Image: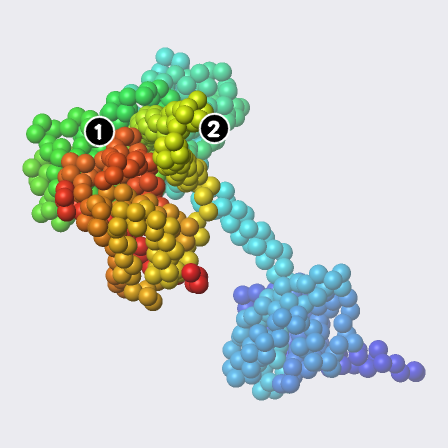
Amino acid sequence: MSYSPHDELNEKKESSFEKMSELNVKQTDSTNIQPVKKKSTIGKRISDPVRSEKRFRKLIENGADAIVLLDSAGIVKYLSPAYAKIMGRDDLHRIGSESIEFIHPGDYAIYKGTFEKILSNPGIPVKFILRNQHSNGRWLRLECIANNLLNEPGIHGIVVNIHDDTVRWNAEEALRKSEGLYADLVLNQVAGVYRILSIKHNPDQPIWNVLMLEFVSDRFCDIIGIKNSDIDQIPSSIVFDSIHPDDRQDFIIANEEANQNFTPFTWEGRIINNNTTKWVRFDSNPRKLDDGSIRWTGVIVDITRQKQVEEQLKKNSHRLMRLNDCLSSLGTDYDLNINRLTALSGALLNATFAQYNRLENGCFFTAGKWQLPEGYPERISPDGYLGYDVILDNSDKTITISDLPGTSYANTDPNVLAYGLQTYCAHVVRREGIPVGSLCVIYNHACEISAEDQKIIGIIASAIGNEDNRKHYIEALKASEAKLKDLNATKDRFFSIIAHDLKGPFNGIIGLSEILTEDAKNLDISTIVDYARMINASALQTLRLLDNLLKWARMQEGKMAFNPVRNVLHKVVDEVIILFAYPAERKKIVLVNQVPTQMTVDADTEMLKTILRNLISNAVKFTNANGTVSIEATNADSWVEIVVADNGSGIRAEDIGKLFKVDIAFSTRGTENERGTGLGLILCKEFVEKHGGIITVESQPGKGSRFKLTFPYKTVESNEN
């Protein structure tokens, strides 16, 4: 007879089975192995061990559960035929292998811990679940009960009863998923789910008498405002009872139409939940049953927030239309526009009264008002008042203050307590970006100012700021127009004066030249020389006038070069004095340069010389014979003062104010009847002011005059002159 490895496996199997047959099999809660009962007949006891072993073998080999025998190291010693049926393959080749090779890698830790527990507790069944891979690749969930019988004579092993629990586990897993889906779709929904059975009834009966609640979710109970109790304890009329009285008739009609026409039921309305009104929407679909009843399955949704938003949108739309109408219809009357905008802010925010306060010259006064209480102050000192703090804060956000009597303003703003002010809402008003006022809406009761309210008050405050800007621009434009008209009138008078002053010298020149032309042959030489001198004087006077006029015109047009440099003042004065040596010598007038030799002045050199020429010319003209004209100068840290002084005829007090005005024809003759140009001092004033300085005059009739010029020091380049 030949011998094969398969025969060896069979021998192992037979040997193991023989050991198993010696067991007194114990019943467990997960195996089909039953205790072996010794069958008895009438008066006889079966005691044939061979027959008993065969029966035991048959039980094990045909049982649905598998039996596996392990040694203390976890080595497989026996596999029952049921194991092959469970796994879909014959694993006899695994006898002698470690049992851990059979299981899912993810269960290694569980198995090792459980095996140690089995070893530590002989004779005590240990229940656990492991995964093993079927021949088709699926992982089965095997429920195992192991009993440590290592010390049992004839067995010396760990007996493991294995039951395929995959189907049950999959069913439970499917149930768990179904329950999770149910929780997601029903229990955890924002909407409440319900199912109502409408029993076939007499149309004359109220529909609520034949309704029966079959199911309601927790959310349904929460929306309706009832406790989530047993469905049988919830009255079928609970829905109808919760409907707002004003909406019940509409709800009944919608229900009856849906039942009669067998159409989906959709209804929006109000319910009362614990004295609180809610908006809800019902949506349900019907299904007719065999007995004629109708089963309604649907949802109820709390749409209170949606309705509030819709209502707010309607309110805001209406308010924005009013705001737009007001802004688009503003006229040219500033005061009327301000009061309209102030009134609009109070009306749109349902305030007790509204006020636009503006700050001018340290005074806080009411520029716009609406429903202002009688006696409410409209002109106050601003410190401590609500509106003034809004200006100081200058925030882009609307400021709201509640419970005014409980704030510090109860002490600083007397209006808070005097007029029972409770809630305050205000926004700063700016003109050209500068805070100039505050638009305030005020309540004598507690109220909540919404974000939309704050936006509206901000828009109106901006519109008031635009009105302030417009008024400011109009006033500035009017002032500019008035100034321009005044300047044009001044220039007209000025050119009239200049034309008159030019006409005189030219008339003299023309008259004298005509005499010379006609009578020169009849005149002696001395007379001709006198006429020539008079013609020369008139021509020089005209030249000076034209020169001054040209410079003044260039100055007005901004075309005259202005290049201030650091000048040595003594040298500049010397250069100007020499120009007047002849007329001064002729009148025996002494010209004295008393300027310190090293003193400097920051000025445009040509303008400085023009100023000195005009002042020294006037001084010589109005100084009597044997008089003195002096030029002095002193300096400080930031300026230089130049004085042109004479001891001549002086100027009357009432005439001093006329000296520098372009629209007044003020010119007097000198001590020897010399004429002036009428423009010299005007030019001096404009040149000095161009440097940032000032020109003043001190004079007494008969004692002389002192013309003072101040020039500020600036950072300029040096001039060798």
Residue tagged 2: 284
Residue tagged 1: 368
> Residue at 62% across / 70% down in the picture?
106
> Residue at 56% across / 54% down in the picture?
172
> Residue at 47% across / 31% down in the picture?
298
Q: Residues within 10 Å of mark 2 (few under 14, many from 20)?
A: many
Percent position of residue 51, x then y: 70, 73
Percent position of residue 250, x then y: 36, 18
Nearer the observer, 508 or 697: 508
Q: Nearer the viewer, mark 1 or mark 2?
A: 1
- Drawn side of residue 130 relative to residue 233, left or right: right
Residue type of the residue flagged with mark 1: Gly
Q: Residue 715, located in which quarter of the rendered image?
A: bottom left
Disc marking residue 645: none
**Mark 1, secondary structure of its residue:** strand
Work out which quarter of the rendered image holds the N terminus and state it: bottom right
What's the CA distance linking mark 1 and mark 2? 57 Å
Answer above or below: position of 599 versus 419: below
Ranked by sequence position, the earlier of labels 1 and 2 is 2
Answer above or below: position of 349 versus 595: above
> Residue at 63% across / 66% down in the picture?
142
